[in-house]
Image (spheres, helix red, strand yellow):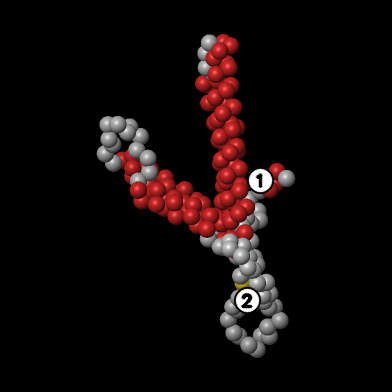
Amino acid sequence: MLSAVFSFQGRLNRLQYFLGAVGLGVAEFVFVLVAGAFAVVFRQQFGLIPTALLGLFVLVVVLPAVMWIGFSLQARRFRDIGWEPVFVIPAWIAVMALDLWIAQSGPKLPMLPFAGPTILGRLINLGMVCCLLFWPGNKYGDEFLEPESGQTSASPAPAQPVRRAVPAAPAVTGFGRRGLT
């Protein structure tokens, strides 16, 4: 069961990705509530807030786990779309880091000492999230197969991928049924 959460292999359709992302967000929210309750109780009992201990726990345990699960969800969804996650995710991170660097090197407003992403960076991020949520997946796996190995040497035709025979999909009626598969 944990391999379903932590694995980078396989595919996720749109609904599975959405539910996984919502589940991850709920888990983060519950952690923040528990950490806040822990800080309040600790302050009432001992008169101080263990910020260093809580911060160390977040940096060592929680942040890597959340990042790992988030990247595994994205990698499996990108693979379902037909994009190679080994190239897409690092490119996305590089574009967001470059955007943040550009935002930091520009002039800052006195009210905002930390400049967040630029409008272009936010639009790129929104576009990638919309692709993850709304781009239809490849229902039948890989679209192309390797060429047949039964070719003779007398025909020096270049090797081209052969389309897979796809069975006809059953007729689906009703609103929104296509988005669930």
Amino acid type at circle 2 is Arg
- Res 76 seen here: no
Q: Identify which residue is drawn at 61% across, 65% down.
A: 174
- Disc on res. 107: none
Residue 32 lies left or right of residue 101; in this view the side is: right
Q: Is residue 123 above or below residue 157?
A: above
Q: Identify which residue is drawn at 38% across, 43% down.
A: 117
Of badges 2 and 1, the one in the foreground is 1
Q: Residue furthest top?
A: 46
Badge 2 crowding class, 10 Å Cα cut-off, few under 14, some 14 to 19, many 20 or more, is: few
Q: Is residue 128 above or below residue 56?
A: below
Q: Is residue 155 above or below residue 116?
A: below
- Disc on res. 163: 2
Residue 122 image offset from top left, x and y in percent: 40, 48
Look at the numbered disc 1 and give the secondary structure of its residue.
helix
Residue 142 image offset from top left, x and y in percent: 63, 67
Q: Identify which residue is drawn at 60% across, 85% down.
A: 156
Look at the numbered disc 2 and give the secondary structure of its residue.
strand
The answer for how far apart the CA atoms under marks 2 and 1 are is 32 Å
Tags 2 and 1 touching, CB below 8 Å: no
Q: Which residue is mark 1?
A: 5
